[in-house]
Image: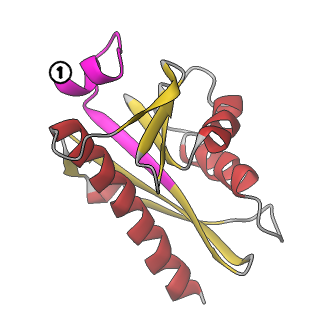
Amino acid sequence: AQELKDFFKANHAIRTIDCFDISHFQSRYIVGSCVRFVDGKPDKNSFRRFKIKTLTEQDDYAALQEIVQRRYRNSELPDLVLIDGGKGQLSAVQQVLPTAYLASLAKREETIYSPQLPSGVRLDLQTNVGKLLIALRDYAHHFAVSYHTHRR
């Protein structure tokens, strides 16, 4: 928790992290996932799958906004909301969760963006923070893809 707090220059401990991802096949069967890690371990009772209800065509930004709003409609925010994506995905979620502590993780570059890290920081895969954030993102991705496959 302290390493994450230091990495993100946060003013609070980061123990609970939710990570969101979107999956689709040729803009069809659009689904989303949210996985929660508490103290670095999966909290499977808090995992959520979402069938996108408001879109008929692929729009990752709108899909993320929908599932984030649905996820927190009646529940507390975690210490950190992590989005699978880059600056655009982060900006889309900021619009619907302006008070949340947010970050996004871009796949190819393994670069993390947040309001505190606007230029992005390339993750060091040898550090605990790097390993945890990559594992979270990959977990959310796998969870979304498996639900998407099931729906198809």
Q: From the viewer's perspective, is 83 left or right of 78?
A: right
Q: Is residue 1 visible from the viewing direction of this image?
A: no
- What is the x, y in percent for residue 99? 57, 20
- How would you rate the neighbour count of disc 1 (Cα within 10 Å): few for under 14, some for 14-19, many for 20 or more? few
Q: Which residues are magenta?
A: 3-20
Say whether residue 12 is magenta. Answer: yes
Q: Quadrant of the C terminus?
A: bottom right
Question: Foreground: 106 or 33?
Answer: 106
- What is the x, y in percent for residue 71? 55, 47
Question: Foreground: 46 or 65?
Answer: 65
Location of residue 139 by image quarter: bottom left
Does 99 sit above or below residue 58?
above
Q: Residue at x 35, y 15 (%)?
A: 10
Question: What's the residue type where badge 1 is placed?
Answer: Gln
- What is the x, y in percent for residue 111? 44, 41
Q: From the viewer's perspective, is 57 left or right of 93?
A: right
Does 67 sit above or below residue 31?
above
Location of residue 47 by image quarter: bottom left
Say whether residue 146 is magenta. Answer: no
- What is the x, y in percent for residue 129? 23, 37
Q: Residue at x 16, y 39 (%)?
A: 128
**Which residue is label 1 attached to?**
2
Q: What's the colour scheme?
A: secondary structure
